[in-house]
Amino acid sequence: MAVRGGGVIGLSVALAAARAGFSVSVFDLGSPHAGSRVAGGMLAPLTEAWPGEEAVVAQGVEALALWPSFADSIGVPLFTAGTLAVGTQPGDLADLRPAGELLTSREIRALEPSLGPAVRGGVYAPGDLAVDNRVLLSALWKACLDAGVVSSVDGRVTVIAAGAWSGALHPALRSIRPVKGEILRLTHRPGALPPPRHTIRALVSGRPVYLVPRDDGLVVGATQYEAGFDTDVSVAGVRDLLRDAETVLPGIAEYALTEAAVGFRAGSPDNVPIVRWLEPDVIAATGHHRNGLLLAPHTARLVVELLQGGSS
Ligand code: GLY
């Protein structure tokens, strides 16, 4: 079997298939803009759900339950402190209310003392996880090699897992579109406040921003545009992300801005992933939009079930 795409979906599929006894190859073009390379790494089905994308939430909840054993099987640590979804304006707090019990400003600060004075309250989602996406990709490659996966395009069955680039690989996937996102990496410097313990997802006067902890800093994301394969990091994108992130966590002003990148999510027409046989010997595993990391073990399981069931 040949997997086209070495992002988190392609590698998770390759690993699961190899562990199920299939002979597997992976081919990847190595784009620096691949979604899983630039991702924030939130594994947060409820706080990541956008209005109109409810169909993905149930899959996300199932996927989250798979993550601890999946991560353990490839030796990847998870950030387990959970997510704080916070807001700065009464309207932001009203938008957060469906996500859970609203905590006061004092209660939310007891959980994350470095939050700025503009944060007026929020919701704590203790079950959400996060992962360092680049640690994950390296560990997946290593686990794939250990399981006998080879780097080539050969195989009887092809699995198209090329993210935003999948549309070029099969006519049935032409509707897959790139959804541009700008994202920043900030590195802790001596004397600065330590990175937050929790993932923080904020609404700042209605604008969404997230801050995902890393061992040495944090990731701030992300803009979202329909702009084709535009690889420019815009001044406005960086300005908005930094302004809103600093409102939430003023201490980041002392951090180093070490990366500003563009990545492309794979949007399907309804933003729901496409995981199915397209024709005998061709399976699609794409269209994961903002949820590729979260859904990876779930999609891998589905693809192995498809392979074991056969194309008929
Ligand atoms: N899942 C985060 C993002 O797509 O920006």
Image (cartoon, rainbow, N blue to C red):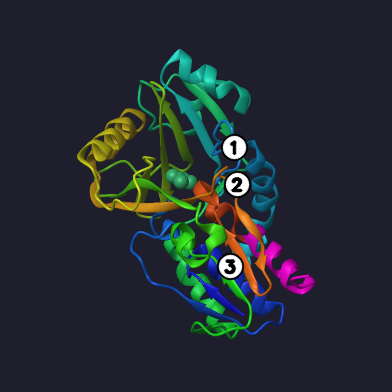
Q: Mark yes or no: residue 28 visible.
A: yes
Residue nearer the viewer, 66 or 229: 229
Which residue is the extreme one toward the top?
A: 90
CB of mark 1 within 8 Å of CB of mark 2? Answer: yes
Q: Position of residue 161 (x, y in %)?
A: 53, 65
Give the labeled residue for mark 3.
12
Question: Which circle's residue, 1 or 2, is located before the other in the chain?
Answer: 1
Query: Residue at left 77%, top 73%?
Result: 308
Image coordinates for residue 78, horizontal then vertical, percent: 54, 56
Q: Is residue 48 above or below residue 306?
A: above
Q: Is residue 309 magenta?
A: yes
How many neighbours does mark 2 have within 10 angstroms: few (below 14), some (14-19), or many (20 or more)? many
Q: Amino acid at mark 1?
A: Glu
Residue at 47% in and 20% down = 92
Q: Is residue 75 visible?
A: no
Q: Which mark is residue 272?
A: 2
Q: Which residue type does callout 3 highlight?
A: Ser
The three-letter amino acid code for the residue at tag 2 is Val
